[in-house]
Each structure stands twice: as C-alpha cells, then as structure tokens.
Amino acid sequence: MLTVILTQQEPDQSLGDDVVLLTVPADGGYLGVLRTATAGLAARLHFALDEIEDLRIAVDEACAMLLAIATRGAELDCRFAVTDDALAVEVSVTTVRGAKLPAESSFAWKVLTALTTSASAEASGKHATIRLLTRRTEG
C-alpha cells in the first residue's frame, strides 16, 4: 500500500520561499514519485530541460544509495527547498546498524557531483541523509 504525505511548510527565510516535504516507502518502485516532484519543482524555477533531467538522475542516484542501506519498512523523507535560482533536495532514511554510504571516490558520488552544484551526505547511528543543491544556470 502506498501512502504519500505531501506538505508545504511556511517559508523559511534561511532556505528560500518554499519548502515541500514528500514521504514515500523506501522501495525502488516509488522513486518515480520523487523524480516527478523533482522535475516539477525544477520546471517551476525555469531550469533548462537538460538541468531538469540531470537533477532527476541525481535524486534517483541519491535515493538508490539510501535504499541500499535502509531498514525494512523504512520511508524515504524528501525535503525540497525552493529559492529564486536553486533547488535544494535533502533525502533521508532510517538505516540498518553500521550502515555506510559509498565513498566519495565511488562512481555514485561522481555522478552526484557531476550532475549537481554540490552534494553532501552524512550517516550517523540509524539515519542517513544526502543533500543536493542545483543552481539554475543563466542564459
């Protein structure tokens, strides 16, 4: 059974005008929901088509990294912060004990850093988070 929780928070001046929260089951079958939300928000910022596709791929890759270490029955929490010229995406999941994200030298991280303005991650205890930031290019 799919339960999608979509909320919009009050504006957070430190993050930008809009913050959208989306929670889906930590299962690859639901990543399309996050990819679609990512594309919709990027389009709202007037990102170019290739920028939108790059961001969709980056979000998909980040989620795949998290799914590999997620606990059974976990949920992926995705937080989108929209500013005038950027989209920040933060994806989190509860993890199995001792879970580690791929090394920054891994292919997965090379993909994330090539497709976004910046990417970072942290895994501590029973929780892991990947943060992506993509700024719209001018022109």
Image: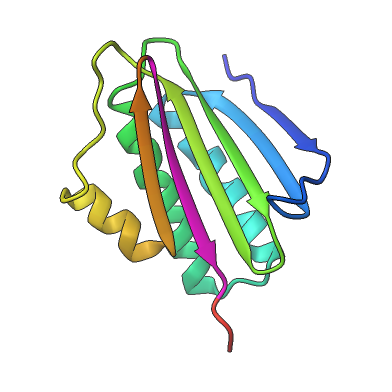
Task: Tell which of 84 and 22 is nearer to you.
Answer: 84
**Quarter of the image where the N terminus is located:** top right
Does the magenta portion include 23? no
Left or right: 5 in relation to 30: right
Q: Residue visible at 49% across and 36% down?
A: 91
Q: Residue visible at 70% across and 60% down?
A: 83
What stretch of residues is rendered in magenta? 126-136
Expressed as whole percent of the image width and height from the top left, the position of residue 6 reads: 71, 32
Expressed as whole percent of the image width and height from the top left, the position of residue 101 reads: 26, 33
19 over 87 or under it: above or below: above
Left or right: 3 in relation to 89: right
| Magenta span main SS | strand
Q: Residue visible at 29% across and 23% down?
A: 69
Residue extending farthest right: 10
Expressed as whole percent of the image width and height from the top left, the position of residue 111 reads: 28, 57
**Quarter of the image where the C terminus is located:** bottom right
